[in-house]
Amino acid sequence: MSRSPIAAGIALAAAAAIAFGVTLPIVSVAGAGLGPYTTAALLYCGAAAVSAGLRLFSRDEGRPLGRDSIRPLAVMAIAGAAAAPALFAWGLQRAGPVTSGLLLNLEAAWTALLAWRVYREALGVRAGLALVLMTAGGALLVLRGGGVLEASAAGALAVAAASLAWAVDNTASRRVAELPPLAVVAVKGLAGAALTLPVALALHEPLPGAGQAAALLLAGATGYGVSLRLYLLAQRRVGAARTASVFALAPFAGAALGWLVQRPALSWELGVSALLFAAGVALHLSERHHHRHLHEAVEHEHPHRHDDGHHDHLHAESVTGEHSHAHRHAALEHAHEHAPDVHHGHAH
C-alpha cells in the first residue's frame, strides 16, 4: 500500500478473478444435462450459503443498507443473478469452457464503457486501445464460432450476452460496494435463486444428481460468493472499470484449467483471440493515473482506514483497521496516484 494506493484493490480483484475462473470447467462438467435455470439456481444457492458461513468468521464492515440501495440490488439480481448465469450456463454447454472463458473478457470491456458512461470514470489511451483489442477478440470468437473448438455460434453469442449482463451487474454493484459485502452476496444469492428456481420448475428441467448438485453448490460458493465479496472490496478501492479490467484474468484461469481437463484441438482463431485478450489485459494493468486534484468538503459514510491519506479525523477511542461511520472531510487539494474510488469521482 505504501508503494501504490491501488495495490490492495488490484490484489483483491485478481483474487476474485481466480476464485471465479477456476469454477468455469466445474460448471461445464457438473452442469452437463441440466437446464440453465437449474444450474443458475444451484450456483446462487451456494453463494447465499457461503455468505452466511463467512459471517461467522469475518467482519463485514460497511454503511447501513438504505432505500437508495434497493434499485441497484434489484438490477444486480435480475441482470447478474438471473439472466447472466442462465445465458452463461446455456452457452457454456455449447461453446465449451475454453471459448466461453475467453469470451467472458468482453465483460471487462463493456464494464469499462458503462463505468465511463454512468460514473465518468476516466478512460485513457491505453484503456481505449485495450477495449478495442478485447472487443475484436470477442468478435472473432463469435463470428467464427462454428470453427473454434467445435463451438456453436449460438453458444458463443449466449456467452457474449451473459458477459454484457454481468457488465450491467458490475456497474450497478459499484453503487453498493460500500455496503457490507457479505450482506450484498446474501441478497444477490437469494434473489438469484428465487428468480431462477421457479423458471426451472416451470420448464420441467432435469433434476440434478447428488454429485452434480454438490459440485454446483461448491462452485457457486467459490465463484459467485467468495468471488463477489472480493470483487466488491476491490471496487471500493479502484472503481468499476479497473476492477473489471483485472477481473478479466478470470477467463484465462478458467480457459487454462478447461484446456488441461478436456484437451480440445486448438485453432488459429483461438490463438489470435487469446493474444488480443492478453494484450488488452496487459494494457489495462499497466495503466497509471496521477494528477493534481481537488477534494470538495463533504460529509458521508463508508468503510475507511486512517492510513490512506484521506482520513485523519479523530476518535474518542483508538480505532485501527477498516471501519465505517459518518465523517466529514475538509476541502483538500493534492496530487497522488489514484483510481476512481469513493473519493476520486472528479471530472477530467
Image: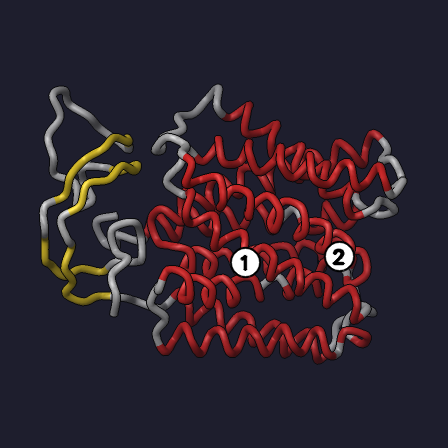
Task: Look at 29% across and 38% down and name the residue there.
Answer: 302
Residue carrying label 1: 167
Secondary structure of residue under mark 2: helix
In the depicted structure, whether residue 189 falls above or below residue 56: below
Secondary structure of residue under mark 1: helix
Task: Look at 30% across and 36% down and name the residue there.
Answer: 303
In the depicted structure, whether residue 207 falls above or below residue 16: above
Task: Look at 65% across and 39% down and name the residue there.
Answer: 192
Instruction: Tell me if residue 284 can be seen.
Output: yes
Name the residue type under label 2. Leu
Q: Which mark is on residue 92?
A: 2
On the image, the x and y values in percent for residue 338 come to 25, 58
**Separation (CA) of disc 2 from disc 1:** 18 Å
Nearest to the observer: residue 212 or residue 68:
68
On the image, the x and y values in percent for residue 88 come to 71, 55
Q: Residues within 10 Å of mark 2 (few under 14, many from 20)?
A: many
